[in-house]
Image: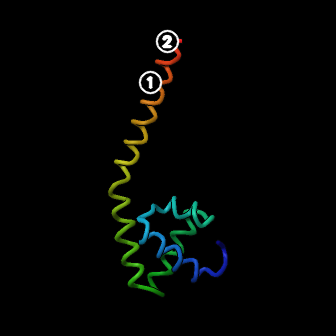
């Protein structure tokens, strides 16, 4: 969804608030870059301050949790490698 930046900013903001999505996930859904998502959110600050505040709450929560998500992804990666190695040894 390229289109009008103002409309996209509102749509992205509502999506982030509704779903609790990360900036990266929202960028994938809307087919734009993470930089574009950040620019859209800065537009919201001036055009829709209430929505901007809600988005900031979600973004700050995601930023506070990101180290946990990264640790979990690393854990799953190594568990997967272990299980693959075990299967190779037994075959």
**Residue 72 in the image, given as x and y percentages of width and height:** 38, 42
Q: In this view, does 64 lie to the left or right of 41?
A: left
Q: Tag 1, which secondary structure?
A: helix
Q: Residue furthest front?
A: 91
- Quadrant (top left/top right/bottom left/bottom right) for the C terminus: top right
Residue 18, located in which quarter of the rendered image? bottom left
Residue 2 lies, with reference to residue 71, above or below; the image says below
Q: Identify the coloring.
A: rainbow
**Residue 78 in the image, given as x and y percentages of width and height:** 43, 30
Residue at point 39%, 48% (across, down): 69
Task: Name the one closer to the observer, 85 or 62.
Answer: 85
Q: Do the residues labelled 1 and 2 touch (CB within 8 Å)?
A: no
Q: Tag 2, which secondary structure?
A: helix
Residue at point 42%, 36% (across, down): 76
Residue 32, located in which quarter of the rendered image? bottom right
Task: Name the one closer to the observer, 86 or 54.
Answer: 86
Residue 24 lies, with reference to residue 51, above or below; the image says above
* Res. 50 mark: none
- Quadrant (top left/top right/bottom left/bottom right) for the N terminus: bottom right
Q: Residue furthest bottom?
A: 47
Q: Mark 2 points at which residue?
A: 90
Q: In this view, does 20 lie to the left or right of 5?
A: left
**Residue 35 in the image, given as x and y percentages of width and height:** 56, 65
Q: Nearer the viewer, mark 1 or mark 2?
A: 2
Crowd tier of the residue under label 1, counting other residues whose Cα lies within 10 Å: few below 14, some 14–19, many 20 or above: few
**Residue 4 in the image, given as x and y percentages of width and height:** 64, 81
Q: Which residue lies furthest to the right in this view?
A: 3
Q: Mark 1 or mark 2: which comes first in sequence?
A: 1
Q: How far apart are marks 1 and 2 (CA)?
A: 12 Å
Crowd tier of the residue under label 2, counting other residues whose Cα lies within 10 Å: few below 14, some 14–19, many 20 or above: few
* Res. 82 mark: 1
């Amino acid at each position: 969804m390229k289109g009008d930046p103002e409309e996209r900013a509102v749509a992205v903001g509502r999506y982030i608030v509704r779903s609790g999505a990360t900036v990266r996930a929202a960028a994938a859904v809307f087919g734009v870059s993470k930089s574009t998502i950040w620019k859209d959110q800065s537009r919201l600050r001036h055009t829709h301050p209430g929505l901007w505040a809600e988005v900031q709450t979600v973004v700050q929560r995601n930023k506070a949790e990101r180290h946990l998500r990264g640790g979990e992804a690393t854990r799953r990666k190594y568990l997967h490698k272990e299980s693959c190695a075990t299967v190779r040894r037994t075959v």
